[in-house]
Amino acid sequence: MSLRCVLVINLSKEDFGKILLFRQFPTVEKRCEKVYGSDYVPLPAPSIFVNNLLVRLALSSDSKQYVEWRDKSNGTMQFPVIGINTEKKELWPVVAIAQNYFLLCCVPFVEDKNIDRKDLLKVFSVSVGFSVLLGIFQILATADRLSCLIDLDNYLTLSMPFGTPSDTDLSSVPYINKFHSQKFIKRQPAWKPFDYKGKQQISFKILEFVRSVQSDQSGGICHLETFGQISVKADVEGSLNDVTVSLLSTESGQPLSLDSVVIHPCVNVHGPSSIGSGSLKRLRFSPPSYEFIMLQYCSPFPKNPPIQGVFKMLGENSVELLIQLKLNDKVKNSFEYCDLIIVFFNRGPVKNMEFNVNHGSPKLSEDKHSLKWTIGSKFPRDLEAVLTAKLEFLEKPIMPNSDSFCVDKNCYAQINFKQSNSTLSGCSIDPKNVTVSEGSKPKILIERSVQSTEYRIWNNYGDLPFPVNIVNKFNQVFS
């Protein structure tokens, strides 16, 4: 899984086509020549490479002209993987991505010369090259261009001196200067280019999201999805200091169950654990210098939505509105924020509003095209919040709407909320079971939070953007 070369090209008007970075790996080129023999296609000179690449991607000045070999309709499209014509044969595969005035390109080394181009997913070096280019884009978008190009060149020397990336995550590039300020006393891994010195501390952040689609039609239907991630920032001394952590469930009588688990490449699962079943007992990893996502997951819990709602809106220019929200009694009644927002699609601004509410405060937006109901940090004692309102709309100006489905009675109310020190899946970390392989135990910080995303309650009198018969059903909580 090696790369033959990496290029960064400027696409701005001032320096269009200028090569900002070109790194070729002679050892990989020798391997490629040996494997392919008479079928070997050498890399063109950098200037010729760039010109052919711009023509192939239709980015050159004459791109509006028809070029048969490029614009014919019977070819196979595999973007961002392309082939480039050279003096001898076509150079393939070439991975190229253009974004934010930059064109990034690399040429992966395919060790199997008999590979069928249709089996692109089997060419692992293409995936590695694509990951490297995405990492370079991250660096170019967040740093000064000149300094980051110097750091990037240094990083390529460190992480892939012979064309084989030891780490495709380029988040450690900002630490390159710190690395070069130290003496080369010992060999450092690419993901941790320098040893941390200072107060030791490991910070774990468990962030969960809950997505829900609800409607009171047909007895109440709901689509519920809970997913999250655990990120880690480990400031520990020692370049190869391993950290071991245990996951647990905070819900009594409910074992930790995680589905669709994706772990970071530096993480190993130890002990009687099964990723397929979602049972993760012990995780061990050698942390990089930067914050990274250790684990991503989905959870089958909770079975019922944390906030269940009913939304009814009927009328044209004069509208009656009813919203009922019920907090699940198993969910902590404490929020950083909890708001409900209704956008009045394809209507004029609100002329007049009369409302009655038992909790919180509703308020129209400045343009009178949306209503925000601020519920606050807590639900009332009975855990139910109700808003009724009568609204009158002007005919113009009509609020533009990009969603073609949201017309007439088809509309939704969206709930935005966030809770701290809580997760819906019950996923947590026991700080007593966090250990390091070297030195004294560092300070352990654990932060948990859950927040909504696309948490929508559809109007009971409108149509639904999903089939009723395939969604999960839950018990009605409103009489």
Image (cartoon, rainbow, N blue to C red):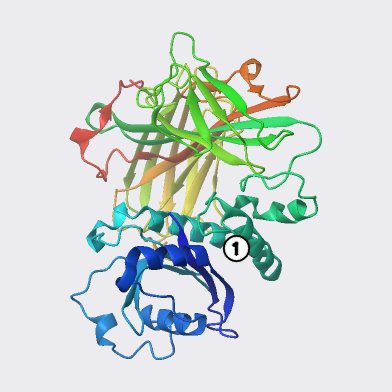
State which quarter of the image contains the N terminus. bottom left
- Residue 238 image point, x, y percent: 72, 34
- Residue 392 image point, x, y percent: 42, 51
Q: Is residue 162 left or right of residue 274?
A: right
- Residue 432 image point, x, y percent: 65, 15
Residue 407 shows in this picture: no
Is 18 rendered above or below residue 434?
below
Residue closer to the observer: 347 or 123: 123
Circle 1 residues within 10 Å: few <14, some 14–19, many ≥20: few
Residue plotted at (29% across, 54% down): 405
Is 157 rendered above or below residue 82?
above
Q: Is residue 325 left or right of residue 171?
A: left
Residue type pointed to by label 1: Ala
Residue closer to the observer: 283 or 6: 6
Residue closer to the observer: 190 or 15: 190
Residue 365 shows in this picture: yes
* Residue marked by disc 1: 141
Q: Is residue 418 left or right of residue 396?
A: right
Q: Is residue 96 left or right of residue 459?
A: right
Residue closer to the observer: 101 or 275: 275
Assign a secondary structure to mark 1. Answer: helix
- Asked where in the image residue 111 lies, by quadrant, the reply is bottom left
- Asked where in the image residue 15 lies, by quadrant, the reply is bottom right
